[in-house]
Amino acid sequence: MQKLVIEGENTLKGEVTVSGSKNAALPILAATLLTDEPCVLHNVPRLRDTRTMVALLESLGKTVEWKADQVTVKSAGTADYVADYKLVSTMRGSFCVLGPLLAKLHKAKVSLPGGCIIGVRPVDLHLKGLKMLGAHIDIENGYVNAQTRRLNGAHVYLGGMFGSSVLATANILMAATLAKGETIIESAACEPEIENLTQFLIAMGARIKGKGSHCLTVTGVKKLHGASFKIISDRIEAGTYILMAAATKSSITLKNACYGHLMALIDKLDQAGVKVAEEGNLIKVTPRKAMKPTGVTTHPYPGFPTDLQAQFMAFMALTQGVSVITDKIYPDRFMHIAELNRMGADIRRDGANAIIQGVKKLYGAPVMASDLRASAALIVAGLAAKGRTEIHRMYHLERGYEFLDEKLAALGAKVHREEESA
Ligand code: EPU
């Protein structure tokens, strides 16, 4: 196992190229199960999570060829319908093979993903939607057994206690493409990743109206065909680099990032004293002199993303004054507080709120990565902190940040990997 070592008080400079979106790539890879024809995907990030999805597709009867950021998925002839616990339990995104398997093979056995460090994460909305399309669903020995003679279009409401669900929308949308008749999905997630999935499904021959909105209307077709498709850039990776620059008061440039996908973060950074501007196809981040504390509340898109909550908190830990961060999507996603406090931050949790009293300095320390975005927050803090920070369990970072060490080094950060001592 490896750890990431950061020699702090970095000033970053230069350019970073943003990779393809992990959370768009995962359901899009799953959507290739809807056809027997080859699909070619471009801009696929090389990550632990995308490799897990590829392994899952291979276990379900696909052959996958990966060349640089291009992935070609073909049918190997025999299709399987069982998504094993080993692959689904390591990554919840795997659960979005359920809709495509059910639509294409009329049966699916997919392991329940279980909870994870960021919360309980139920799948009731996925199951409710598929049942409304005519699936019979039993839960047995930790697996969802779903079958149907044929899926039929229905009017489905997908809002839950915490708003819309990204992967439940992906599952129902994919299932509806091959269902008989019309499906209307109300309170659909409108995250750019779902919009990108919708574009891919349309490229495969699906008939979908309302792309990128809270109401998707799908007219089922008999068959989908192969397609060649480019995945959008990763707005969470882009936001993470922007917050690294903000916390270290650095000016950097992002290439291949989508400004429009980052508006909630850009607005908050403007209030906090960081200018983020679009210049042609580049995004330029420039700190102003004084940084101000600014509260955020996470919401489904276009609100402030929960996947940037931890990184924003690391930045707020260094602004003078008090800020409050509330996570309305995952009210327990606060594992990073204790680790940031080990670095000298002054953060207190109160239910779904974190109350941050800004400090003048953070200090390097050995810290433990607990999940992907919490680990990213520790990098934000480590780059700004005085002294050496060691982030243990760095495999969490490999789930979502492509070429992390290289990109950080190119920005002038003093970062390297070391083997963990036994
Ligand atoms: N929820 C339910 N019932 C359901 C499904 C979700 O109550 O059936 C709740 C969740 O517990 C949560 C809220 O609804 O409170 C939203 O969860 P959502 O279903 O949207 O999350 P997800 O689809 O499982 C994706 C991303 C997450 C990201 C969330 C929220 C992927 C592979 N994962 O998860 O990404 O945090 O949407 O935006 O797309 C990450 O990349 O680090 C990550 C965790």
Image (cartoon, rainbow, N blue to C red):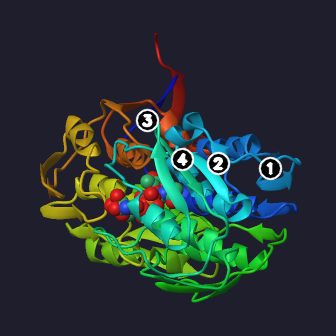
Q: Which residue is mark 2?
A: 50
x%, y% of residue 404? 57, 45
Q: What amino acid is found at the position of numbered circle 4 in the picture?
A: Gly
Q: Is residue 218 above or below residue 340?
A: below
First in sequence: mark 1 or mark 4?
1
Helix, strand or loop status at disc 3? strand
Mark 1 → mark 3, Cα distance in angstroms: 28 Å
Tag 3 near tag 4, CB within 8 Å: no
Q: Is residue 406 above or below residue 292?
A: above
Q: Which residue is mark 1?
A: 68
Mark 1 → mark 4, Cα distance in angstroms: 25 Å
Mark 3 → mark 2, Cα distance in angstroms: 26 Å
First in sequence: mark 1 or mark 2?
2
Q: Which residue is mark 4?
A: 412
First in sequence: mark 1 or mark 3?
3
Tell me, yes or no, if residue 417 can be seen here. Answer: yes
Tag 3 near tag 2, CB within 8 Å: no
The nearer-to-camera label among 1 and 2 is: 2
Give the quadrant of residue 388.
top left
Helix, strand or loop status at disc 2? helix
